[in-house]
Image (tube, helix red, strand yellow):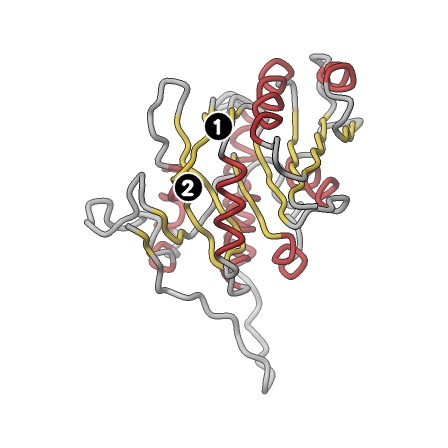
Amino acid sequence: MKLSVVIVNYNFCEMLRHTLSSLIDAGKYIDYEVFIVDNASTDKSVEMLKNEFPQFHVIANNSNEGLARSYNKAISMAKGEYVLLVNPDIISSKKTLERALEFMDLHTDSGGLGVRMVTPQGRFLPESNRGLTSSWISFFKLIGLASTFPKSRLLDRNRKDWVEEFQTSEVDFLNGAFMLLRKAALDETGLFDEHFFMYGHDIDLSYRLRLAGYKNYYFPKTYIINAGDRSLPKFNWHFVKYFYGAMLIFAFKYLFKMPEIKVAGVPQPQLPLLYEVER
């Protein structure tokens, strides 16, 4: 099988219906399967899926288990050469899946790929090619990790060689709204870290792909419409706990740890600093 699509849903019933319809149109000439993991939605999402999309695999959790754990449940069952993770509030163009898969087939060094994202009004989302929100950028500057990621616009947003909207390029991070991943790379790096409940799981996995020697690519020759994340209101206590908690998990995982024990003959992972850009 070529592709396994995985969606985690929590009370996005109406938008999920449109998302799945667009993926069906985009996957007409692809051998694919779809998994929807529902985190105990109360808006009759599961009933809608069983009635309108019986051809897809539905995993109904009894409680909200978070994104990382829910994705891992489905990925562990996936049979595709590639795994595509998409939010339940995106609309795919008709050629998005075909073009993205063609690029991954041609670039065997790729671990993952993201595409150009636009709002329903047609505005380009800069998270498409930097993978980070402004809050995460500030966080990486604060902890001194910004210089490790030269293509994420962390230090100087006015440089002329940054990746632009229509440039295909290697990037540091992939945005979780659309992550096309090579299954063989996941077998090597492991799946999502389940300590990340709702945020940061995509950043952590992107980082681990690079540590493993794979490249993450931004591919703008196709697009998705991203309606945006409405899962939690901003400045709500749960948002603060999950969003800023993810930052602390990342910092403790990669910065505040015991000294490395170096063993002769075992190379230490090094991040490549050179990037490819197709203009």
Question: What residue is pinned by disc 1?
Answer: 93
Q: Check residue 132 in the rendering and tell me which mark sits there, or answer none.
A: 2
Q: Check residue 25 in the rendering and tell me which mark sits there, or answer none.
A: none
Say what amino acid the circle numbered 1 marks. Ser
Is 152 situated above or below 62?
A: below
**Position of residue 262 measured from the top left corner of the image (x, y, whole percent):** 57, 80
Quick one: SS at disc 2?
A: loop
Q: Real-space Cα distance between discs 2 and 1?
A: 23 Å
Mark 2 crowdedness (10 Å alpha carbons): few <14, some 14-19, many ≥20? many
Q: Single out the mark in the foreground, 2 or 1.
A: 1
Residue 132 lies in quadrant: top left
Q: What's the residue at 37%, 44% (across, down)?
A: 137
Q: Nearer the viewer, residue 167 or 238?
A: 167
Is 260 situated above or below 74?
A: below
**Position of residue 259 measured from the top left corner of the image (x, y, whole percent):** 55, 72
Residue 51 lies in quadrant: top right
Quick one: SS at disc 1?
A: loop
Instruction: Tell which circle, 2 or 1, labels the residue nearer the N-terminal end.
Output: 1
